[in-house]
Image: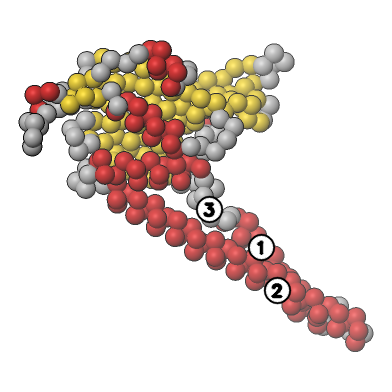
Amino acid sequence: MSKLYLTLNESPQVVLDVMSNVEQQAKGARGSWNRGCLAALGLLGLGLPFFFLDVVMGYNCLTFSLVGGVLWVAAFIVGLRLLMTGRARVESDQYSAARTIIETLKDDIGKKGRLIGWLDLTGPQQQSKVFRTGRTSSGKTKTYYRDPWLQTKTKLVDGNLLRLTLIEQIKVKKGYVAAREQRLKARIVVNPDLYRIRAFSQEEVQTQWSSARLEVQGGIINLVYAYATGKKFDPWDVLNALKYLYSHLEPRAELAPAAGL
């Protein structure tokens, strides 16, 4: 996965268009990379007969072999450049998950709404993302990284304010990833003119979202949900959590339409 960082400060459709453009550029770059590999292999193949010509015809190694050597040097340079640039890819679980989430929320945000935040796919194992270090029983260093790879804030068309943060936390011990956890943080600031918050049952929360922490204070719903992951990141875990929170918002009775309308 190529490192990617997108600053979000546009409508959802513009963000989705940018993400599609990134994919198209990566696809074009992969095509160039593949053609470069074929060119390097072709240069190696073209150079080989020149060495055989010197052997068959009995010439010294600086006659036809010199041409073959030039072709092989060119192949080495092309190959080295390909190794340095790498093969562009954006097919990460996080990238596709972010696109699914934004695509699903697009209509709730509206054409005039904006997504503000970032999509950071530069990876968690960076010094700036270290949040704790410790020691193993044998005295080896273990490092904990916290990577908020997707963070968005937006005002929905119904007047509610949504903040969403997706975090990957990993523990690196003895040079390898020993534990990995995904964390969802969601906050809905409810529009008091339109909605009231129906009480949450703590038993229901634990049944729906084990290890979740949910708080309601002054018209604000906060959800923190952490779960270990050894599988592909599923954006529907996030969307179902938001759907569950929204199921507890009830329109105020005085704004309900009159019977028969």
Please name the residue shown 66% across and 62% down the image: 79
Judge whether residue 195 can be spotted in this image: yes
Left or right: where 61 falls relative to 116:
right
Quadrant where the image shows the C terminus: top left
Q: Name the residue under label 1.
A: 79
**Residue 52 rendering spot, x and y as whole percentages:** 86, 79
| Residue type beneath disc 2 | Leu
| Residue type beneath disc 3 | Arg
Q: Mark 3 points at which residue?
A: 89
Circle 1 — which element? helix
Front one among 211 and 144: 211
Question: In which image quadrant can residue 243 be found?
Answer: top left
**Residue 155 rendering spot, x and y as whole percentages:** 22, 35
Rounded to the nearest angstrom, the CA distance separating label 1 from label 2 is 11 Å
Please name the residue shown 62% across and 22% down the image: 142
Left or right: where 213 falls relative to 34:
left
Please name the residue shown 61% across and 60% down the image: 82
Circle 3 — which element? loop
Front one among 164 and 86: 164
| Residue type beneath disc 1 | Gly
Q: Residues within 10 Å of mark 2 (few under 14, many from 20)?
A: many
**Residue 234 rendering spot, x and y as whole percentages:** 48, 37
- Badge nearest the viewer, 3 or 2: 3
Please name the residue shown 40% across and 46% down the image: 99
